[in-house]
Image: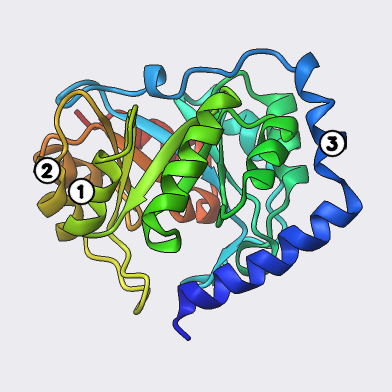
Amino acid sequence: MNRLSSIVERKSVEVAVAKLHAPIDSLESALAGLPPCYDLTGSLSQPGGPTRVIAEIKRASPAAGVIDGDADAAELSRTYRDHGASAISVLTDSVGFAGSLDDLAAARRQADVPLLRKDFLIDSYQLVEARCAGADAVLLIVAALSVGKLHELHAAAVDLGLEVLVEAHDEAEVEVALGIADCRLVGLNSRNLGTLEVDLAVVERLAPMVGPEVAVVAESGIRSPADIARLRASGLANFLVGEALVRSSDPGALLTELLGVG
């Protein structure tokens, strides 16, 4: 069993347990009172536009291990908001990333910018969880889902008012993402899910496949202004940055520096 398959299997068990503790009916009853979602796609740039950053809250990862186990979601959210983040991504997976839905809710209380729930989403129940916890958008990973399930979850998310960042790692996955009806937002991830190695050339290679009608976000391996300058040369303008910000002694200053490129 490969790494991603193992994670999906674990997530299936977690979702089943969550449904026992909080049945879907109890979550859905809370949806009616929620405010409209913030517009993630609208907060991002078109190719060649100003640099935009989705700043991420991530205490750990399978690739990096512990990044900052004491990172405070509320504090980071305030910092990201105050220093110009276009949106905030919150890792809610507990085992691999030391996150939770509580982090998402904490970020919602602090920041009036779009929030992205980043997790291994395999069930529509998780979409309702995300909406109830304050998410405006969710991540769907092409490699983690069958094509049919991907389309199903994308449609279910849109029905809930959520936007969807569809994550692709290679040419075939980009084609699958672009084949989704109403796909507005594609994430190009430079990390190899098998080896966990990062190569920004992957994003440079894939970016020309996506037309201007779809917003593109470069994900993984973006640590410095030089990385952003490199990818901007390929027409990219939107970047998801997590580990570098969380590791920084002054994440606000680093975010300002990243946004200054271009």
Q: Are marks 2 and 1 in contact (CB under 8 Å)?
A: yes
Foreground of the two, 199 or 185: 185
**Residue 55 visible in this rendered orientation of the protein:** no
Q: Residue at point 20% right, 52% down?
A: 203
**Marked residue nearer the N-terminal end (3 or 1):** 3
Q: Are marks 3 and 1 in contact (CB under 8 Å)?
A: no
Q: Position of 257 compared to 47: left or right? A: right
Report which residue position mark 3 lands on. 25
Q: How would you rate the neighbour count of disc 1 (Cα within 10 Å): few for under 14, some for 14-19, many for 20 or more?
A: few
**Marked residue nearer the N-terminal end (3 or 2):** 3
Task: Residue 238: give x, y in percent of width and height.
Answer: 30, 34
Secondary structure of the residue carrying tag 3 is helix
Q: CA distance from mark 3 to mark 2?
A: 41 Å
Task: Residue 66: give x, y in percent of width and height.
Answer: 60, 69
Residue 108 appears in which quarter of the rendering?
Answer: top right
Q: Residue at point 63% right, 40% down?
A: 127
What's the residue type where badge 1 is placed?
Glu
What's the residue type where badge 3 is placed?
Asp
Secondary structure of the residue carrying tag 2 is helix
Q: Position of 215 compared to 40: left or right? A: left
Q: Is residue 179 above or below residue 29?
A: below
Q: CA distance from mark 3 to mark 1?
A: 35 Å
Secondary structure of the residue carrying tag 1 is helix
Residue 259 appears in which quarter of the rendering?
Answer: top left
Q: How would you rate the neighbour count of disc 2 (Cα within 10 Å): few for under 14, some for 14-19, many for 20 or more?
A: few
Report which residue position mark 2 lands on. 209
Q: Which of the colour schemes (rainbow, by chain, secondary structure, one colour) is used?
A: rainbow
Residue 16's disc is none
Q: Residue at point 54% right, 51% down?
A: 246
Report which residue position mark 1 lands on. 175
For the C terminus, the image quarter is top left
What's the residue type where badge 2 is placed?
Met
